[in-house]
Image (cartoon, coloured by chain):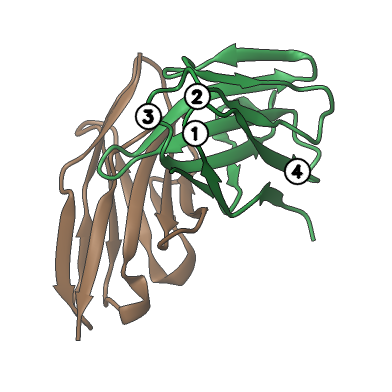
Chain colours: A brown, B green
Amino acid sequence: AQSVTQLDSHVSVSEGTPVLLRCNYSSSYSPSLFWYVQHPNKGLQLLLKYTSAATLVKGINGFEAEFKKSETSFHLTKPSAHMSDAAEYFCVVRIGNDMRFGAGTRLTVKP
Amino acid sequence: DGGITQSPKYLFRKEGQNVTLSCEQNLNHDAMYWYRQDPGQGLRLIYYSQIVNDFQKGDIAEGYSVSREKKESFPLTVTSAQKNPTAFYLCASSITGQGAWTEAFFGQGTRLTVV
């Protein structure tokens, strides 16, 4: 069985400051890992995905995530937050067709 | 443009009625999924299908039914047996047989409200 835990339900940052959204996973096998972003009443958009090629993964809109097997973590970061980054973010772990979603982290960006 | 189309965007249902949510994809994906989203609970899997004419129950299938008669289409019926159907419903699709690295693509969702 696999699962994913997003450690913060809500994160608030000021515009221009760094963003850190935390994700820990549990899996018996080597999983795929993804981060998605969701704006209100919209579908999910892929930010980035982890493959075995590199542990530091770069995504769209300046986001990146680092896969740390020893810590079973896949935290999402961005050096400088923008107002348009305000949204809900989901960490996902996948083995084959079994995808498990975290509960989500709501990111608020203050002017 | 390739993608997933869900319709309608908003749907209102009277108690005791069945309603059907549409999901169509032109990505040529074999696998399709239905998720339910409630505030603070992330996404929960209702049903998924890996191939035409075959589908499997997810974690919360009770009160829902699906069909997969065509590769492109995976409609979800919310039946009167579903006691709390008000939620945001998301359809997704993905490639199968490509190993563990494939992401899922999502539609824009249908918000169902019971009135």
Which residue lies under the disc numbered 3? B84
Which residue lies under the disc numbered 1? B35
Report in which chain the residue with disc 2 lies: B
Query: Split into 4 quadrants, where in the image is the N terminus of chain A?
Result: top left
Label 4 to label 2: alpha-carbon separation: 18 Å
Label pair 3/1, CB-CB below 8 angstroms: no
Q: Residue at x 40, y 62 (%)?
A: A40
Residue B51, placed above or below residue A109: above
Report in which chain the residue with disc 1 lies: B
Label pair 3/2, CB-CB below 8 angstroms: no
Q: Residues within 10 Å of mark 2 (few under 14, many from 20)?
A: many
N-terminal-most mark, 3 or 1:
1
Label pair 1/2, CB-CB below 8 angstroms: yes
Label 4 to label 3: alpha-carbon separation: 27 Å
N-terminal-most mark, 4 or 2:
4
The furthest residue to the bottom: A111
Label 1 to label 2: alpha-carbon separation: 5 Å
User: Which structural element holds mark 1?
Assistant: strand
Q: Residue at x 28, y 39 (%)?
A: A103
Residue A74, percent from left and from top: 30, 43
The three-letter amino acid code for the residue at tag 4 is: Gln
Which residue lies under the disc numbered 2? B46
Query: Split into 4 quadrants, where in the image is the C terminus of chain A?
Result: bottom left
* Image side of residue B40 versus residue A98, left or right: left
N-terminal-most mark, 3 or 2:
2
N-terminal-most mark, 1 or 2:
1
The three-letter amino acid code for the residue at tag 3 is: Asn
Residue A16, percent from left and from top: 22, 83
Looking at the rendered image, the disc whose residue lies closer to the viewer, 4 or 3, is 3
